[in-house]
Image: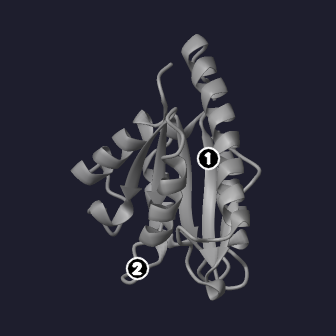
Amino acid sequence: MTPLRIAVIIGSTREGRAGDRVTNWFTEQAARHDDLAVTVVDLTEYDFPASYPAEPTASIRAFVREVGRADAFVVVTPEYNHSFPAPLKQAIDYAYDEWQAKPVGFVSYGCRSTGRYAVDQLRTVFTALHAMTVRDVVGIDLLGGEPTPQCTDELRRDASVLLDQLRWWGLALRDARAARPYVS
């Protein structure tokens, strides 16, 4: 069977962000599953324009290709002021059909809230794009420190549950898209 292609999107572009370290921890958890092919999509690597252009730029086209190649997604997002970062929304909006009929999971982080408000808002955005968000989330309270290889069993268990749900939905929806193109 072809491995499920998961794009892990780092949703923060701030200098000094925790997102790359949280993503590294999560991809280490995902690497334990040989039926998953994980690609990290770091928004800092794309030169997106400040305003939405009439024609897609090379960076927009490259990002949309990455989204199109993936069978499933994990969005790693911080919570800033009870929401998710503007660059993440901008990137999400550059793709449309590429999100449809694919599952999205979330690894969120923040102080005290563990990023739950950001995830709630992202669920609304992805529902509008006809994506399927999985129920369970990995939520990290940075006041307790960033995840490390020695992190709690609970956090590792949360990552395993998220990956199991993403795998099930990813495979089911990949088969469904192959049998019958999604129409919105």
Q: Residue at 35% of width from left, 48% of height from top?
A: 63
Q: Residue at 63% of width from left, 19% of height from top?
A: 176
Q: Quadrant of residue 72?
A: top right
Q: Is residue 173 above or below residue 36?
A: above
Which mark, by number, is residue 14?
2
Q: x%, y% of residue 118?
A: 66, 69
Q: Residue at 37% of width from left, 42% of height from top?
A: 66
Q: Is residue 107 above or below residue 129?
A: below
Query: Which comes sooner in the sequence, label 2 or label 1?
Result: 2
Q: Is residue 28 above or below residue 70?
A: below
Q: x%, y% of residue 134?
A: 71, 46
- What's the residue type where badge 2 is placed? Arg
Q: Residue at 71% of width from left, 56% of height from top?
A: 157
Q: Quadrant of residue 13?
A: bottom left
**Disc 1 secondary structure class:** strand
> Which colour scheme appears in the figure?
one colour
Q: Is residue 129 visible?
A: no
Viewer-side residue, 101 vs 22: 22
> From this viewpoint, which residue is outermost toward the right?
135
- What's the residue type where badge 1 is placed? Val
Q: Disc 2 vs disc 1: Cβ atoms closer than 8 Å?
A: no
Viewer-side residue, 39 vs 86: 39
Q: Is residue 49 above or below residue 160?
A: below
Which mark, by number, is residue 104?
1
**Disc 2 secondary structure class:** loop
Compute the Cα span from label 2 to label 1: 23 Å
